[in-house]
């Protein structure tokens, strides 16, 4: 049988988790830094329109997540979302993949095949690694975007399509245009709205928020009894440069969970080269002399301020009625009394006179 004290603690942890996730969660993305808030604002602004979008960012920053978010918030949400990696399909097959082909169009074409653009009708076509698109396909794609029509390989009939294009690239398309490697007219056609994703190293405290969310998510999936990350490990994650961005952080957290011996991820579970690169341990294996501070200390301050404001608003809404406040917060009344005392709040001050 679970102890009453444990029930209250679990309820308190769940309450705080909901408070922390709410302001930083946006669809399947997490971010609280100004650059990511601008990204979220742009997604909200462009999703309801039908303009084509270019997402630019380093490898591993989450460009496909942005594209999916735009799709799910648009009028096309019930239609297909079709991602295509332009660099992963051989050039000789790209045209048929995009536009399909008619029976007998070439040797081996024994039946008609619907292309990806036609399949995406009334949906969103996500072109990943746009800079890898060959010149011939650039010209055909430009015409498709202008006319909103396709013609299957070996066919004569033009087929109307209703497709929104979201493209992504890590390459400098402006430089490619100057070098004659990318069509300027296609660039202007797709780049109606541009969303720039910041690299992880420029996202400050988001590193800690992401690491914490990943720890929670993957510990459940991997059936690990890991509840969090130590302050020293947070400090290492915060100071590392993350050349592989969010994808690399995901890999590090999953590795640490697999190696964790206790209930917390410590510096010992992080890759040695990462710890050294972060300046937290010398090549001889010495531990850092610096204390936690940084992200962890700042995070605690922000959480305390946010938590206190939450309970002030809660008491105002219910005119100081702790019973009704506890019901809304979905925690035991005793837990709410304890949290009010922690923040120096008196419910009587919020009662109507």
Image: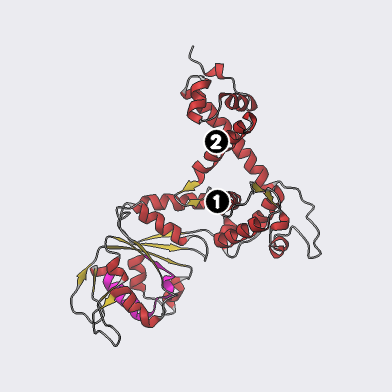
- Is the Cβ of the residue at disc 1 closer than 8 Å to that at disc 2? no
> Quick check: 108 above or below 248?
below
Judged left or right of residue 183, residue 285 is right
Residue 7's label in the rendered image is none
Does the magenta segment cover residue 263? no
Range of residues picked out in magenta: 126-145
Residue 9 in picture, x, y percent from top left? 62, 33
Please tell me whether residue 127 belongs to the stretch shown in magenta.
yes
Q: What mark, if any, has residue 217 been given in the picture?
A: 1
* Front residue of 175 and 122: 122
Could you say where residue 253 lies in the image, as x and y percent from the top left?
61, 57
Q: Is residue 204 visible?
A: no
* Residue 204 drawn at (x, y percent): 60, 52
Q: Quadrant of residue 311?
A: top right
Q: Which residue is pictured at 55% across the width and 16% down the height?
A: 348
- Residues packed near mark 2 inside 10 Å, few (<14), some (14 to 19) or many (20 plus): some
Q: Which residue position is annotated with label 2?
A: 15
Secondary element at tag 1: helix
Magenta region, mostly helix, strand or loop? helix
The residue most toward the front is 1
Q: Is residue 11 visible?
A: yes
Q: Residue at left 23%, top 69%?
A: 147
3D distance between C-alphas at marks 1 and 2? 17 Å
Decide if residue 74 is on the left or right side of residue 257: left
Q: Secondary structure at mark 2?
A: helix
Does 77 sit above or below residue 353?
below
Residue 27 is left or right of residue 292, and the answer is left
């Amino acid at each position: 049988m679970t102890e009453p004290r444990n029930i209250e603690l679990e309820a308190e942890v769940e309450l705080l988790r909901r408070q922390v996730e709410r302001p930083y969660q946006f669809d399947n993305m997490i971010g609280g830094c100004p650059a990511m808030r601008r990204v979220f604002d742009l997604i909200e602004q462009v999703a309801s329109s039908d303009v084509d979008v270019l997402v630019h960012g380093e490898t591993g920053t989450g460009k496909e997540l942005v594209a999916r978010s735009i799709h799910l918030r648009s009028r096309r949400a019930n239609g297909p979302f079709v991602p295509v990696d332009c660099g992963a399909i051989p050039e000789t097959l790209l045209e048929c993949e995009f536009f399909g082909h008619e029976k007998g169009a070439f040797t081996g074409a024994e039946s008609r095949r619907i292309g990806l653009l036609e399949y995406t009708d009334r949906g969103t076509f996500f072109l990943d690694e746009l800079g890898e698109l060959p010149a011939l396909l650039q010209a055909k794609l430009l015409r498709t975007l202008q006319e909103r029509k396709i013609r299957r390989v070996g066919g004569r009939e033009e087929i109307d399509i209703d497709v929104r294009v979201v493209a992504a690239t890590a390459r400098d398309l402006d430089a490619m245009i100057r070098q004659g490697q990318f069509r300027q007219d296609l660039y202007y056609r797709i780049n109606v709205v541009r969303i720039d994703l910041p690299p992880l190293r420029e996202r400050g405290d988001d590193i800690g928020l992401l690491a914490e969310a990943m720890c929670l998510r993957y510990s459940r999936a991997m059936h690990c009894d890991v509840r969090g990350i130590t302050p020293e490990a947070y400090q290492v994650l915060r100071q590392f440069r993350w050349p592989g961005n969010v994808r690399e952080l995901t890999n590090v957290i999953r590795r640490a969970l697999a190696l964790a011996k206790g209930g917390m991820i410590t510096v010992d579970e992080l890759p040695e080269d990462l710890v050294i690169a972060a300046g937290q341990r010398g090549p001889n294996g010495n531990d850092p002399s610096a204390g936690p501070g940084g992200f962890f200390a700042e995070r605690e301050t922000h959480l305390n301020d946010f938590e206190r404001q939450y309970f002030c608003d809660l008491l105002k809404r219910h005119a100081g009625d702790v019973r009704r406040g506890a019901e809304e917060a979905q925690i035991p009344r005793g837990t709410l009394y304890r949290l009010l005392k922690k923040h120096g709040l008196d419910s009587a001050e919020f009662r109507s006179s």
